[in-house]
Image (spheres, rainbow, N blue to C red):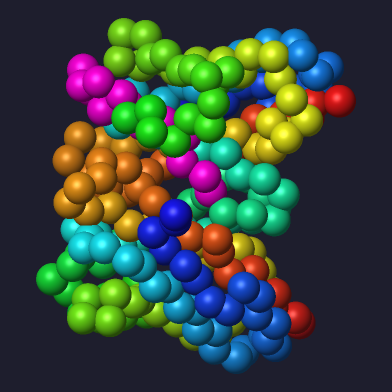
Amino acid sequence: GAGVSQSPSNKVTEKGKDVELRCDPISGHTALYWYRQSLGQGLEFLIYFQGNSAPDKSGLPSDRFSAERTGGSVSTLTIQRTQQEDSAVYLCASSEPGRPEAFFGQGTRLTVV
Amino acid sequence: SQQGEEDPQALSIQEGENATMNCSYKTSINNLQWYRQNSGRGLVHLILIRSNEREKHSGRLRVTLDTSKKSSSLLITASRAADTASYFCATDGAGYSTLTFGKGTMLLVSP
């Protein structure tokens, strides 16, 4: 079956512009995670969705960052007024109900120029 | 701060040698997982060990967990050039609902 799909694979944007990153989780997976990874660094947690529960937004670095998950499936991460320090790979992952193993997409590499 | 911290940050070995990576964490966990990442893109789940387990094997992988020391190790035996990647530990547990990753160990296996 299909894995976690992220789009676009790469995005170059000008400083100050808004960007939307999309994540299609594996069908039936109720948990969805967004992480950010700067070059050569570890994964920085951004936001976590679990079923119909309120999302855990504790990792969002500023109010320029927001995320939605529509219908318990597709998720969109929006970054407003992008800054150069937002340049990173944004990774999405999903997992089955009751199972902690996460399945990752290939990420979106965001470059802010 | 991040829950898991791996060491070493980088490890360089020859094919056929064993590679050992360590992970330390700070708070109580339900599970500890190890993931692999090639070329800075998506991570692949390797192995999970539960808090009531002490050792687990999967193929050439061996994971140990010491909850009293809040540490885990990943051993890759008879390494291959194809094992070259970054390896991350991740924890989940009471008090937080998501997976928290360490900074990773970069493993280079030379032919």
The percent coordinates of residue A26 (x first, y second) are 38, 28
Camera sees residue A23: yes
Q: Residue at x 55, y 84 (%)?
A: B19
Camera sees residue A28: no
- Confirm whether the magenta stretch covers residue A106: no
Residue B69 picture quarter: bottom left
Quarter of the N terminus of chain A within the rendering: top left
Q: What stretch is highlighted in magenta?
A: A43-55
Residue A56's place in the image compared with B85, above or below, is: above
Towards the viewer: B34 or B58? B34
Residue B75's place in the image compared with A4, above or below, is: below
Residue B68's place in the image compared with A54, above or below, is: below
Residue B63's place in the image compared with A42, above or below, is: below
The percent coordinates of residue A105 (x first, y second) are 53, 35
The percent coordinates of residue A74 (x first, y second) are 42, 15
The percent coordinates of residue A39 (x first, y second) are 72, 49
Q: Which residue is drawn at 73% across and 35% down?
A: A85
Position of residue A65 in the picture relative to residue B68 (left or right): right
Quarter of the C terminus of chain A within the rendering: top right
Can you name the residue that lies furthest to the left here? B52
Can you name the residue that lies furthest to the bottom here? B17
Position of residue A82 in the picture relative to residue A50 (left or right): right
